Amino acid sequence: MGKIKDLPIFERPREKAFRYGTNSLSNVELLAILIGSGTKGNSAIDIAQAILNDAHGLLDLSNMPLSSMLKFKGLNKISALKLVACFELSKRLLFSRVENYDGEISPAFLFHKYYVCLAYDNQESLIIIVLNKRKKLIYEGELYRGSDNNISFSFRDIFRMLILHNGYFYYLIHNHPNGKLQPSEADFILTSELIKKSEQVHLPLLDHIIITKDGYYTFINQPHVNKVNKMDFSTMKNKKSVD
C-alpha cells in the first residue's frame, strides 16, 4: 500500500477519525491508529490488516497475550503493549459491575456480558455472580482460573463469597476452552453437588452456565438436562430463599 501520508488527507485514519468520528473507521483503521507508524514498505494499515488476517479476526486478537502479540511482523514493543492494554481495558469494562442496571439478571444477559471475555480464553475460568434477595447484582468476580480444561476449588469458598457480600442467590459461569458446549460428566457432578449444598445453607444456585464460541449451556433452564440430575435441578428452581 505504501505510506499513509500518500493517501488523500481525509482517507487517512487519524484525519478521518477527527472529521467523521472513530465510529466511521474500520477495524483495520482503528488498529492502525493504535499501531501508530509503519515500517519500510509497509504502512500501519498494512500491518494492521496482516495482524487481523494472521489472528483470524478481532476476537482472537483481543485474547492474545503480549508474548504472542510481539511475534507479529512490523509491530514494535510499544505498539504491541498499546494493543494489549486497549483490549484489557475493554475486558475490564465488560467485567465491571453493572450497578445501574435494573433489569433481570438472566443466563442470556450473563452470556452476552461475558462472551467476549470467556469464549476465546485458552484457560478455564470460574465466575461467581452474587445477587441480593431482590435478585439484583451486588458482586461478580473470578473465583478460580484453571489450566486448560481443569478447575480445582472448594464449595466452602463459594459460600464464603456469598456470605461476605450478603448474597441470597448466585450464578456460576465457566468456559470450555476446548469449544465443547456439552457439559462433561464432572460438570454434571459438580452442579448436582452444588445444588444439594446450596439448599442446605439456603443460598440457592439459580443456574450454572457454560460459555463457548458457539453459544451457552445452562444446567437448570435447558430442556436436555440428563435424567439423573433433572430432579435436583427442578427442586432448585422452586426453592425459596430464607430471609
Image: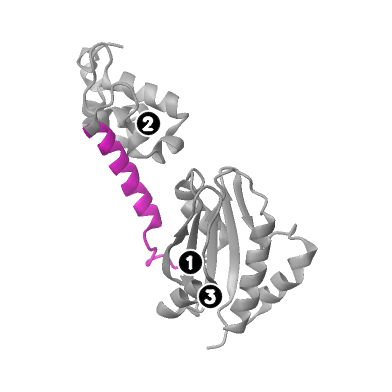
Q: Which residue is mark 2?
A: 27
- How was this image coloured? one colour
Locate residue 73, reporting x and y percent: 32, 21
Which residue does the numbered mark 1 point to in the structure image?
Answer: 129
Find residue 189 and report its horizontal and vertical position in percent: 67, 64
Seen at 64% across and 48% down, the residue is: 181
**Magenta run includes residue 158:** no
Quote the CA–CA distance across marks 1 and 3.
Answer: 8 Å
Give yes or no for residue 83 being in the magenta stretch: yes
Viewer-nearest of labels 3 and 2?
3
Q: Amino acid at mark 2?
A: Asn
Q: Earlier in the sequence, mark 1 or mark 3?
A: 1
- On the image, which quarter does residue 97 sit in? bottom left
The residue positioned 28% from the left and 26% from the top of the image is: 75
Residue 220 seen: no
Q: Are marks 1 and 3 in contact (CB under 8 Å)?
A: no
Mark 3 neighbour density, 10 Å: few (under 14) some (14–19) many (20 or more): many
Q: CA distance from mark 3 to mark 2?
A: 40 Å
Which amino acid does the dot numbered 1 rest on? Answer: Ile
Give the mark nearest the N terminus, 3 or 2.
Answer: 2
- Alpha-carbon neighbours of circle 2 within 10 Å: few (<14), some, or many (≥20)? some
- Residue at point 28% right, 43% down? 85
Report which residue position mark 3 lands on: 169
Upstream in the sequence, badge 2 or badge 1? 2
Main secondary structure type of the part rendered in magenta: helix
- Amino acid type of the residue that numbered disc 3 sits on in the rendered structure: Phe
In percent of the image, x 79 and y 64: which residue is there?
Answer: 227
Using residue 13 as the reference point, say whether residue 180 is left or right of it. right
Range shown magenta: 78-102
